[in-house]
Image (spheres, rainbow, N blue to C red):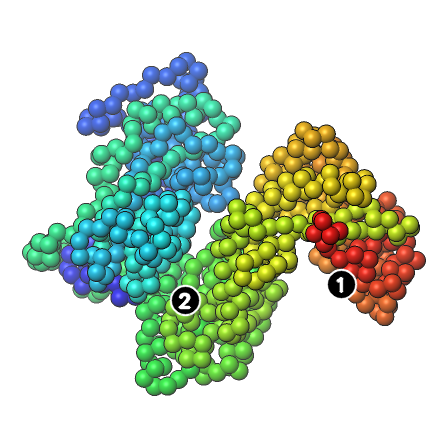
Amino acid sequence: MRLNRSTTSSFSMIKQCFLLIATCLSLSLPAQEILPGSLYAADNLQRLQFSAQESDWIKQHRNIRVAVRNGWMPIEFQLENQKHKGVSIQYLQKISQLTGLKFTLVDYHDNITSNEVPLVTGIRGKHMPTGFSLLATPYLETPNAIYVASHNKLYQSEIQLAQLSHKTVAVFRNGPLSQKLRELIPGVKIKLVDIADEAFEYLDAGLVDAYVGNELVLDYHLDFHKIKAIRKSGITAITSTVFMAASDTDPMLRSILNKATLQIGINPPDILEVWRRVPENPLTPYLVSALSFFAVLLLIQLLKLYQANKKQAVAAQHAIWFQANHDFLTKLPNRFQLKHELDQALQAATHHPNKLGVMIIDLDNFKEINDTAGHAVGDEVLIKVAARIQSIILLPNLTARFGGDEFLIVIQQEASEERLRQLCAQLMTAMAPPFTIQQKSFVVSISIGVSLFPDNSLQAEELIMFADQALYQAKRTGKNKFILFNEGMHDAFTKKTHLSNELRYAVQKNQLHLQYQPIFNLTDLRCEKVEALLRWQHPEFGTLSPEVFISIAEENGYIIELGEWVFQQTIRDFEQIKQRFGPVEICINISPLQFSQSAPIHHFISSLAARSISGDHFCFEITEGLLLEPSSNVVETLNSMHEHGIKLAIDDFGTGYSSLAYLNKFKIDYVKIDKSFIKNITVNLNDQALCKTIIFMGKQLNIRLIAEGVETLEQEHILKEMGCQYSQGYYRARPSDLEDL
């Protein structure tokens, strides 16, 4: 990225020295607290009047723990080894002065609960932890601004949203802004990004025309990092609000905080004055030059005062440069440094024809380590993983921390396919031994995606993208493996992205329909059940089965809407099925994600009751994984199903997990033997033994068995002799539309 940073001026050097001194002085500080003090005279605020109950509550709960983020400048952040800073912290100080409450700051994490803290700051939109609710009034509301690259023709004058019509605009992924822009700007193309730096890179490379985001945050970011190649070119009418959220179990605290925020108000001017940044004045370079002269003189006096010398100044400069270009945890180069070094490596490989490999490594089970052992242990794991990678990947090859639990490697020596495969194998072998941390062992496996220059691409961004697609394929097909990128993989990824974009509108475009496949009782060959199977009539690819699009729906959150449509359609089809087949059961496949947001399931049950339809006519098919460690919400939903007579079937039994304890713990009505066991049952004695064991187990537990994928009379005969009760497959009936069933 070609972002210009003014790091050579004397003024910048002074600022960086002060930052280094502050960092050193802040080591080993206790937990940060905000204590009630006297009101500032300029605030023109009076202490709040509370009810007797509120006053008693404050006396009994003087110290309140507050969760704040540490990487959202200038709202709330924490530089390495420094205290929490930002708008949220100063706002809490005002609340403390008004209420007399003392606040203890703790680090926010995604799974924070009301048992850990009763108050969370920095809540945007609907992204809020479970068990918390927003206060009545936001404490910050800032406009969203338009940013462009200084070399873009859009920068020639102040621009409005209408000028972005049919342009490509970068927008932060987690928020409502993208939807609002689509509503306001005809033909706008949205590019979702995870962080501001990613958007700035797209702007500088010309991959997007503009970036729309929070003015306060982005102005501060540009100023803090001295980014000159990106400029603000317009202000929109769209605003972003930031709230505090209080625990649902503390109504008295909520009442007290609502009074305080109402009196302080939104956007306190004295706070915003501290953190707001303005565009650089044309005279600034001259002022900086003049100030630099005096700053150098001041620096000399400061260096004498602290008995420092030129070597210490150089060391401080290097330390700050290192912090800006390296990951503070693993000490590896970060994304900024990686981009710079990768560009240089590609230039060298172009001038002196040479192959170059890009490898992305992702830890397969890192989230489980964070969730079970804590983030401190997770950080230690990342440090040890980085060390093992560096023991294999030697200079001049480059290893960088790409973000989270991902590492990126650039191989500049002997980057043939064979050599890359050898390195991947060595890396996976190096990760095999357990990591010992705090006298506990942790096993970490890795997945690796690889792309090759010039075979796959000549561009850095594409090489990274292709390696990431190969990594996704490795994760999707079993993890703990490596895959080299190929063009077919890119085509599949592009098709999947295309399907994902169109699946979002499949319901409203009436592209979905149901087919039903009969299930026969092997005793008398009566059709006692039908399974509802979702089909997508795609305008380009024709009829698509769930195997193609259900995983896409689950990954992108569309599965809830699809599930609701299936529920309503089966209710509409019920009377016709009943007239044609009598009192048969309709089996509906349910995704585990539908249990995490179970309102549609409860609505389906209510709809049956409203139409006087007995739940006995329906059966939900789920996979084994849902019952291994079910949440209280899952258990509650299962109990509600049983109360209304809806039956439960385990689909694809035997393909996922070895634990069978859930069969005895929950009321299971049916087990469906997976078709992979049925396929070779006539010739494979092992498959026969497995099926016979599953059927015997079902009989002992009073669970009825359904064989899936029965395609021949011989298969059906063997299953019947084993005692299997039901047959489903192409031998008896294929899935059909209702009118053809």
Q: Residue at x 21, y 60 (%)?
A: 153
- Say which residue label 2 marks: 400
x and y, in percent, of residue 608 in the image: 69, 33
User: 480 above or below 438?
Assistant: below
Disc 2 marks a residue whose amino acid type is: Ala
Label 1, residues with CA under 10 Å away: few <14, some 14-19, many ≥20: some
Q: Which mark is residue 676?
A: 1
- Closer to us: mark 1 or mark 2? 1
x and y, in percent, of residue 265 in the image: 29, 28
Q: How many marks?
A: 2
Instruction: Judge from the rendering whether residue 484 lies leftward or rightward of residue 303; answer left or right.
Output: right
Q: Are marks 1 and 2 in contact (CB under 8 Å)?
A: no
On-image quarter of the N terminus: bottom left
Disc 1 marks a residue whose amino acid type is: Ser
Q: Residue at x 62, y 64 (%)?
A: 478
Q: Residue at x 63, y 54 (%)?
A: 535
Which secondary structure, mark 1?
Answer: helix
x and y, in percent, of residue 33 in the image: 36, 36
Instruction: Judge from the rendering whether residue 648 lies leftward or rightward of residue 592; answer left or right.
Output: right
